[in-house]
Image: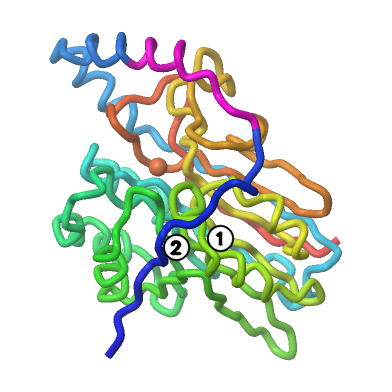
Amino acid sequence: MDQKKRPVSGDQSHINGKKQNYTLAHFVLFLVRKLMRLRPLARFLKAKALHLQTTEHAVISSYLPKSFHQFKILHLTDFHIDCNPSVIDELVKTIRPLVYDLVLLTGDYQDDYHLNPIKIKSYIEKLIDTIPNGVPVVATLGNHDNNATIRVLESLGIKVLINESYEIHRGKDSIVILGIDDVHWYFSDSAISAFETINPEQFTIVAVHSPEAFEIAEKQGAHVYLCGHTHGGQICFRAGQAVLTHADCPKHMASGSWNFGRLIGYTNRGVGTSGIPLRWNCPGEVLLARLVQE
Ligand SMILES: [Fe+2]
């Protein structure tokens, strides 16, 4: 039996956006890394980085079928479990009281790309065990994940979408979740073909790791775009002022809600931390997206 694989990275040249000036950002990161060598400070900052905020956000659209009015999606992203495994305990505590109809995971389960994801399976399992029976869990991959991640997620009953769609039905109505593989490093012809399957008449939510494919999603007629990857900057001078976003897209798309044409987007700051277990002026985020028919 053929195992599911992510396609080989393709041409990213048509993903347009603003190039970042990395010089200042990397200098700040260099200083932070030095400071993190002070153990009591590192312990304090690591604990502070675990703080998660729950955002309840209404996605209002006249295209939404009536039966999906008040449908709730729990969107989680950017776990980077091996960077700070305690994040899963915090996450479990945070989501336990929430009520939702679908769970959407948009990648970066691990921080080290070369890590065998079997090593973080028990943490993902803890998260899945918190989700009530009957609630579907759909996932895409991030740029830190690898092909073995697919098998680990599928072994836990998660539906992994690699440039393919998943339909949800309610009565005569349906909506589509189009799961695109990471577009930061793995944008490929398969992703383009998947975008071309969008039927603008059918309410479509694009689930993808990074905001960088916003243009093609809008052009093909998608209605909603849920993503992560940027961590909202992870380190911000002031709330919302990211030092670095690692995303080739306009800065206002690096965190929170945004619009592009008729596309409604949300970039989730994610739950974990990458590289250094530190968040500053930029807490981790759990998104509860409520679909509302206008
Ligand atoms: Fe990430």
Ligand 1: quadrant of the figure: top left
Image quarter (top left, top right, bottom left or bottom right) of the N terminus: bottom left
Is residue 46 positioned above or below 120 on the image? above
The residue positioned 78% from the left and 56% from the top of the image is 60
Examine the rendered structure and indicate whether residue 215 appears above or below residue 125. above
- Per the image, label 2 sits on a secondary structure element best described as loop
- Earlier-in-chain disc, 2 versus 1: 2
Q: From this viewpoint, is residue 126 visible?
A: yes
The residue under label 2 is 140
Please name the amino acid that badge 1 sits on.
Ala
Residue bounds of the magenta highlight:
18-29
Kind of residue indicated by mark 2: Thr
Q: Are marks 2 and 1 in contact (CB under 8 Å)?
A: yes
In this rendering, position of residue 220 left or right of residue 53:
right
User: Mark 1 — residue?
Assistant: 207
Residue closer to the observer: 80 or 134: 80
- Prevailing secondary structure class for the magenta stretch in the rendered image: helix
The answer to which image quadrant residue 202 occupies is bottom right
Against 177, is 111 above or below? above
User: Which of the pair 280/216 is nearer the observer?
Assistant: 216
Q: Position of residue 259 (x, y in %)?
A: 76, 45
Label 1 neighbourhood size at 10 Å, few (<14), some (14-19), many (20+)? many
